[in-house]
Amino acid sequence: MNWEVLVVGGGKIGRMVAVILQNAPEFNVTIADADEKMLAEVAALGIATQKVDVGNEAELLSALDGKNAVLSAAPYFLTPAIATAAKKAGANYFDLTEDVKSTKFVMELAKDAKSAFMPQCGLAPGFVGIAGYHLAKQFDSIEDLSMRVGALPRYPTNALKYNLTWSTEGLVNEYCNPCEALVDGKLKEVAPLENLENFSLDGIDYEAFNTSGGLGTLCDTLAGRAQNVSYRSIRYPGHRDILNILLNDLKLNKRQDLMCEIFENGLPRTRQDQVTVFCTATGMIDGQFEERSFVNVSTSMEVAGRDWSAIQITTAAGVTAAMDLMRQGRLPNEGFVRQEQIDLEEFLANRFGALYLGKPFETRGATPKAA
């Protein structure tokens, strides 16, 4: 069965999702946005567009008519409006948000829904939950599960050693909000920017610290099985200390709009990025205390004839693989669906999930390669 998909939000991630789906014969996709300039840029990619004001429920419901699924690639504060419209329209709902409050709203909506609601389907939350749960399932009991993700410039030059690669609002939001974690077997809120750790991977030094939203629903899933579960963002050393000055000492955590403006004006964007997923678990396996890890590094690459950044690829691959698996009947088609319900091996075997392994999928109309 072919799926008609509405992507709300024509930014960098939304258009990457649309290009992936449009190049698969089982999907037809339309991007909805209120920004006419952005819609023109999307149309130049050969993607169908529709001007929609998300604040106008009638417009949004009209755009959802006949759609099998909707993806919110819009800012996190628009999640409730888009999810509510999806429920009324009977469309399967997906989003990429790291915002905990918005996700709890979606969970409530999903309780009596006749369609599926699967939020937090991107990179983190999203793929990291699949990878983390893959490790967790190997243990009889889990002492610690540490999940770390970094979307980083390959060639850092400024003091923050950082470039903008995705939503600035989402970035600042995860730096400022409380973080969920399992601590000694109990669900707790821990402060952002805390629990700083330093480590090396392939000869490069990194730091990691608490940020909000990356765990998705994994704490609930592992409650009673794991003692400690945490999520941290990976950065180059020194990044956290500068953030601490800006957000806490200068109180910009109370002016997130200004913090976004500072980042937008002062930090250049880059497509020369890499995404690192680094998960480590310790616990008991067959009576022995063991440690196991999962590492995946993705870089920018060409997809469907265009160059895309690593953060675009990994975020878009997360949600498109989830959509594809649901379309195939491999995930529930009603109620709340957790990202970790996807098996890691099945995810990576999926044509879209395989983008994490640097494998471009066969695009619509492509000439088959000779054996």
Image (cartoon, rainbow, N blue to C red):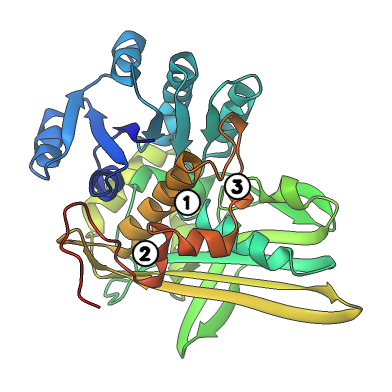
115 left or right of 288?
A: left
Q: Which residue is mark 2?
A: 355
Q: Residue 54 at what x, y percent from top left?
A: 32, 20
Task: Give left or right: position of 334 versus 35.
Answer: right
SS state under label 2 = helix
Q: Residues within 10 Å of mark 3 (few under 14, many from 20)?
A: many
Judge from the rendering whether residue 56 lies leftward or rightward of residue 253; answer left or right.
Answer: left
- Residue 240 drawn above or below residue 291: above
- At horizontal 23% and vertical 56% (from top left) the residue drawn is 363
Seen as rendered, the residue at the extreme top is 58
The disc, 3 or 1, on the residue closer to the chain's N-terminal end is 3
Q: Which residue is mark 3?
A: 216
Q: Residue 338: give x, y in percent of width and height.
A: 61, 43
Distance of mark 3 from mark 1, alpha carbons?
Answer: 24 Å
- Residue 116, picture quadrant: top right
Looking at the image, which residue sits at the far right?
287
Residue at the (47%, 29%) spot, across then down: 92
Which numbered tag is attached to residue 247?
1
User: Which of 137/350 is in front?
Assistant: 350
Q: Amino acid at mark 1?
A: Leu
Q: Is residue 100 visible?
A: yes
Q: Amino acid at mark 2?
A: Leu
The amino acid pointed to by label 3 is Gly
How far is the residue under mark 2 from the one under mark 3? 22 Å
